[in-house]
Image (cartoon, rainbow, N blue to C red):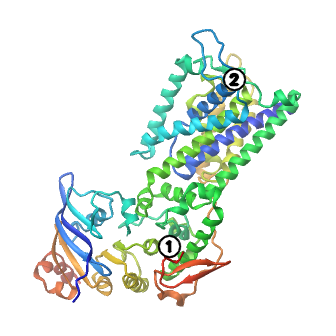
Amino acid sequence: MTIVQPILELNDVVKNFSGVQAVRGCTFSIEAGKATGLIGPNGAGKSTVIELISGFQIPDSGTIKFNGNEVQGRPAYKMSKLGVARTFQTTREWASLTTLENVLCATRDRRSEAAWRAIFDRRQIKRIDAEDRMRARDLLNRVGLLKVKNELSGNLSGGQKRLLEFAKVAFARPTLVLLDEPHAGVNPVMGNILAEQITNLSKDGMTVLMVEHNLGFLEKVCDNAIVMSLGQVIARGSMHDLRKDPKVMEAYLGEEESRG
Amino acid sequence: MLNYWVSVLTLGLIFAMATMGLNVKWGWAGELDLAMFGFIAVGAYVYGVVVLPPSKLPAPDHYILGLQWGFFPGLIIAMIVVSLLSLVVGAVALRKLRGDYFGIVTVAFVLCLAIFISQYTFLFDGFPGLDGVPQPFNGVLNLSPTGYGIFFFALTILFTFIAYFILELLANSQFGRALRSVREDQSAAMAYGRNVYVLKLKAYVIGSAVAGMSGAFFMAFMSAFNPYAWAPAETFLLFGAIFVGGSGNGRGVILGALFVFVAIQEITRLFPVLPGNAQASDALRFVIIGFLIIAVLWFRPQGLLPEVRDRDGEPGPTLKDRSISFRDGWVHRGQRIIRIANRSKSEAK
């Protein structure tokens, strides 16, 4: 087996929120080009880890390496420039922009957004816009939102907003995709399509790290998963192995199994 | 009568310019800038001191510069000075503050500015202010008062149109879209690589430059300006014009400005003058505008002309295209846009 260079490495990352230790010494790494799940009971610190990697929070201590470079404490827009895209647990669409505009706006290409181009380089930015629109329509088509492309995104249903978040992340063409509960509120049929599309992302060489509570969905998409509990990684491996791990059963899966 | 209407409409258009500037800040970027009248005033003063001859006022009265440079240099220097001033204010106030907190800082700024300008007589002659600013081009044209009024009205229309045209280009570009994304959700805009601080600062400076332009026109039109002419509270009239006309819509805010600054002004003029209370009709103007803002926000919150929504006319791809690579890009080949398999757009170029 060849050794794959990890694209993301967290080393002993700590984050406190005024007394509450959300993440306490979290250490893990994920390999490039794979889809990895991040699971654990509520309050395990999964979403905080996403916030820390994407630059929305600054860790109190510890290091985060992305592509071999230390990136902890960099602002979110710089992380995006490095190739990290994320979705939010509560969907954050730009409500008074249309669905299509939302996708167009998710570009990481800053050059066409220069104010002077709007006046002096109109041909070029119109070309870029026309090309972007083709790709945006294609992505909306994949997640079944093409028919609502001209609707204001604030008027979409919860599930549709979820799918829109995914289309936006895919439009940004990042190297690392952080998905925070992409399946919440999505119906089973669209869920299957979404699973297929997330798999496509990793087939295309993008690395996916995904927080998800629906383990059935996670199993369809992810090769393996990292289990967090109380701000630390307690296990990692394939979903099959994790189900047998007593520590995991105790922290999370056991609860899940006994319920359903 | 013609004179009267021409001057009322000219003033209405000058306020429409200012409203367009505020629309860049509030309508596009969502910045609650309450210092707008401060920028208009600085534009007016700077235009004045560039156009006026050197100060010969008895001490301590004095104004700076006195260059006698004419209309266009005055206009351009006024816009540049206001832009630089707003760059400083914005760089401080936009750094960490959002929404109301940003608004509070701008109020503090404009109140300080008003006191500073009215007390520091060396700069713009404090309370007496500037007067006797020559009418632009009339030295060459030698028009009758009515003819000149119409000429200046035409000049104002021209510049209102130029400002409108440039702002519409900006609004309908990727830049305008990026600003609207910042207005709707800053964090999400940041997640896609936007430096929100810089973007908001750009909008702030562009909006202020337009305010500087309207200030210069105000000075050229009135030929005098002093601290009584710019109560910081008048900024709320500009907001009123935006709410009535339609926030984010270029034509809407011009309509709103004409409505608030011309129509309502004229309506309150028809009210009978109360004996012993000459100011009543002027005060009623603010009351009526207040009610109007409430009524519009209640019954038609998007304004008379709502923000124009993007209408994408072309149909998208068909359903079976679903499994192609995310790395595919579309690029122009001549007039057609074709798909380049498995390559990102930047690589394809």
Q: Is residue B13 left or right of residue B119?
A: right
Question: Label 2 lies in what chain?
Answer: B
Q: Residue at x 54, y 60 (%)?
A: A113
Q: Residue furthest top?
A: B58
- Pinpoint residue A224: horizontal percent, then vertical percent: 24, 83
Answer few, some or many: residues within 10 Å of disc 2's Cα (few below 14, many 20 plus, some between 14 and 19).
many
Report if residue B96 is visible in the image. Answer: yes
Task: Confirm or deny contact between disc 2 and disc 1 (CB under 8 A).
Answer: no
The picture quadrant where one finds residue A13 is bottom left
- The residue that mark 1 highlights is B346
Q: Is residue B39 above or below residue B22?
A: above
- Say which element carries label 1: helix
Quadrant containing the C terminus of chain B is: bottom right
The amino acid at mark 2 is: Leu
- Pinpoint residue B160: horizontal percent, then vertical percent: 72, 44
The picture quadrant where one finds residue A72 is bottom left
Report if residue B241 is visible in the image. Answer: no
Pick the residue in front: B66 or B315: B66
Q: Is residue B180 left or right of residue B195?
A: right
Question: Label 1 lies in what chain?
Answer: B
The amino acid at mark 1 is: Ser
- The residue that mark 2 highlights is B52
- Pinpoint residue A50: horizontal percent, then vertical percent: 29, 66
